[in-house]
Image (cartoon, rainbow, N blue to C red):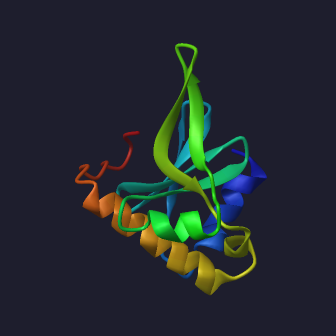
Amino acid sequence: MSEFVQSLHEVFERFGRIETRRMFGGHGIYHEGRMFALVARDTLYLKADEQSVAHFDRLRLPAFEYQRQGKTAQMSYREAPAEVFDDRDEAAAWARRAWEAALRSGTKPKRKGRA
């Protein structure tokens, strides 16, 4: 696990306990069994939905993209603002927003030990 991924426990300390799990060459970031963030190439992305995307758009934060069968695909995760790494209260606010988007998505929480 990279130092960057390990540092997220401290970054989100005011939000609550997080778990990190390896996935597809990156890491999923979970709170209470729900993935609310991901790390790819040492970049943090937070879950976004139609209720929260305006916060990301206002800061012009790009969506997470990947190549699939020669085409670019986007996921409902947006790059985290730089402020989350400098301000624990700001990190907690963004994490809460992302976690609420994860709750609204309707995906079931993952049990411990399962990715």
Task: Name the quarter where the N terminus is drawn.
Answer: top right
Q: Image quadrant of residue 91?
A: bottom right
| Residue 102 point in image, percent of width and height | 35, 59
Q: Is residue 32 visible?
A: no
Residue at 36% across / 49% down in the picture?
A: 112
Outermost residue on the top side: it is 69
Residue 3 as seen in the image, left or right of residue 45: right
When the figure is inspected, residue 62 is found, relative to residue 31, above or below; the finding is above
Where residue 11 appears, as percent x and y from the top left, is 65, 72
Q: Is residue 21 visible?
A: yes
Tell me what residue is drawn at x 35 percent, y 56 percent.
33
Residue at 64% in and 61% down? 60
| Residue at the (36%, 67%) spot, across then down | 51
Query: The C terminus lies in which quarter of the figure?
Result: top left
Q: Where's residue 52, x and y in %? A: 42, 67
| Foreground pick, 27 / 113 | 27
Question: Is residue 39 rendered to the left or right of residue 20?
Answer: right
Q: Is residue 7 above or below residue 15?
A: above
From the viewer's perspective, is 73 left or right of 102? right
Q: Is residue 1 above or below residue 90?
A: above
Q: Nearer the viewer, residue 25 or 63?
A: 63
- The number of numbered discs placed on residues in the rendered structure image is 0
Q: Position of residue 17 (x, y in %)?
A: 48, 70
